[in-house]
Image (tube, helix red, strand yellow):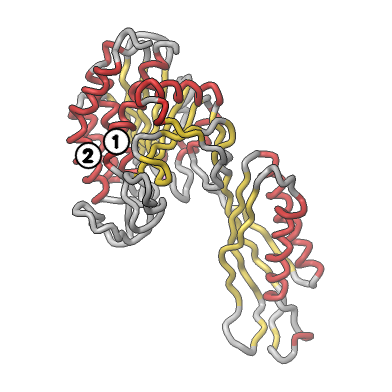
């Protein structure tokens, strides 16, 4: 299959790079930065690329994004993407390289994704004479809460790309395995705020006012009928109100109430119906009770993530070839979590891969976004080899 660079060569190259990539991963872990503030991270990755002799451009996606390029002869271009950002979480792992910054933590493994992609870039740079086309390495800021990936697409960075791949560490899968999910693999995520305006009055005289807390309660309950009464049960969706704020005293009916929530869907069709339904139910339920409601949908949205079936099959064949049949996990259900790599996959065919992160076959591993989660270094050789082989084989026309 790989005439130009056999599997053993890649495996050896990965092993040679592994110590410095593990060290780089720990450095990134010590310096977690959140959405669009990844300046230390961006500088460190740029320095690594420079030392490896890899050309790259900076300043993407509002400033901290990096796009590196390794060119071989040939018309095809494949892109590999890693996210760079951390979360507002106080770390509780106790590892020697734990976060040096209060209330900041790489609790979603993006330190691992970025270090992994640095390793892949250096490996392919060292073997660029074997590439039959161009590889773009995209280091993307603000995956969490800000959908930074949309700016990569808006800047046109995928316009010359034929296919795009990314991976995410997955704590429910064992180290050495890779999860595949063709089609709808992750949900859309949208957030909204509902503001209800009633009329304040004495708590003993509700007839003189319009109680926004009562209206908010009706809206919360009615919103739950969207999923249970308006949708096809075979098309999953979620509506969650996660915050309510109203009132200030036990004997005063307040003037206003505010609620925040999120909704998830696996298709654009269901997502559109939820946009319509949330607005309709909030506005008209308020109206029925003499109050008014306004719904504001927030800007940082995540579309559903759709893995191209052919590209998923291609990546699966590479994993089977590299790591054996036992390494393949067919994820039978999508996750209702979201991922801004969905924007890339709206633009170009590709696949989002789930990289096994649990070192134990029997014990559970801390979940993503848990203060005890730490990307497992044992997954790096698999991640690096998988990404490198995907790039090489894709450019060879497989
Ligand atoms: Ni993540």
Q: Would residue 356 appear left or right of 293 to someone viewing this image?
A: left
Point out the image quarter for the N terminus.
top left
Q: Would residue 288 appear left or right of 124 to someone viewing this image?
A: right
How far is disc 1 from disc 2 in space, using C-alphas?
Answer: 8 Å
The CB of the residue at mark 1 lies under 8 Å from ligand 1:
no
The CB of the residue at mark 2 lies under 8 Å from ligand 1:
no
Residue 250: image location, x then y, percent: 61, 88
Residue name at image x 29 percent, y 14 percent: 6
**Which element carries disc 1, helix, strand or loop?**
helix
Residue name at image x 29 percent, y 40 percent: 42
Q: Pointer 2: what residue?
A: 22
Residue name at image x 73 percent, y 55 percent: 228
Query: Callout 2: 10 Å neighbours few (<14), some, many (20+)?
Result: many
**Which element carries disc 2, helix, strand or loop?**
helix
Q: Pointer 1: what residue?
A: 380
Q: Earlier in the sequence, mark 1 or mark 2?
A: 2
């Amino acid at each position: 299959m790989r005439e130009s660079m056999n599997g053993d060569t890649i495996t050896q190259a990965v092993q040679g790079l592994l110590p410095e990539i593990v060290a780089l991963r720990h450095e990134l872990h010590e310096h977690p930065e959140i959405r669009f503030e990844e300046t230390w991270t961006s500088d460190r990755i740029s320095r690594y690329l420079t030392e490896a002799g890899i050309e790259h451009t900076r300043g993407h996606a509002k400033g901290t994004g990096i796009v590196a390029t390794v060119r071989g002869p040939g018309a095809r271009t494949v892109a590999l993407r890693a996210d760079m950002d951390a979360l507002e979480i106080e770390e509780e792992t106790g590892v020697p390289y734990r976060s040096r910054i209060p209330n900041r933590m790489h609790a979603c493994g993006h330190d691992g994704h970025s270090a992994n992609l640095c390793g892949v870039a250096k490996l392919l740079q060292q073997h660029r004479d074997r590439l039959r086309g161009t590889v773009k390495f995209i280091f993307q800021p603000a995956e969490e809460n800000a959908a930074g990936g949309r700016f990569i697409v808006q800047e046109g960075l995928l316009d010359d790309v034929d296919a795009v791949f990314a991976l995410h560490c997955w704590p429910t899968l064992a180290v050495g395995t890779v999860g595949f999910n063709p089609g709808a693999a992750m949900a859309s995520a949208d957030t909204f705020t509902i503001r209800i305006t009633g009329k304040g009055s004495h708590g003993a005289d509700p007839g003189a006012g319009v109680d926004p807390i009562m209206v908010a309660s009706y809206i919360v309950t009615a919103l739950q009928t969207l999923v249970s009464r308006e949708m096809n049960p075979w098309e999953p969706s979620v509506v969650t109100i996660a915050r309510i704020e109203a009132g200030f005293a036990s004997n005063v009916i307040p003037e206003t109430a505010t609620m925040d929530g999120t909704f998830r869907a696996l298709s654009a069709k269901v997502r559109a119906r939820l946009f319509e339904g949330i607005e309709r139910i909030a506005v008209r339920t308020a109206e029925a009770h003499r109050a008014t409601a306004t719904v504001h949908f927030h800007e940082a949205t995540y579309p559903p993530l759709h893995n191209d079936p052919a590209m998923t099959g291609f990546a699966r064949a590479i994993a089977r070839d590299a790591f054996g049949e036992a390494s393949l996990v067919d994820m039978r259900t999508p996750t209702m979590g979201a991922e801004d790599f969905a924007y890339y996959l709206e633009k170009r065919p590709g696949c989002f891969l789930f990289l096994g992160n649990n070192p134990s076959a029997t014990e559970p591993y801390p979940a993503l976004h848990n203060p005890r989660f730490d990307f497992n270094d044992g997954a790096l050789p698999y991640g690096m080899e998988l990404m490198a082989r995907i790039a090489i084989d894709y450019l060879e026309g497989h």
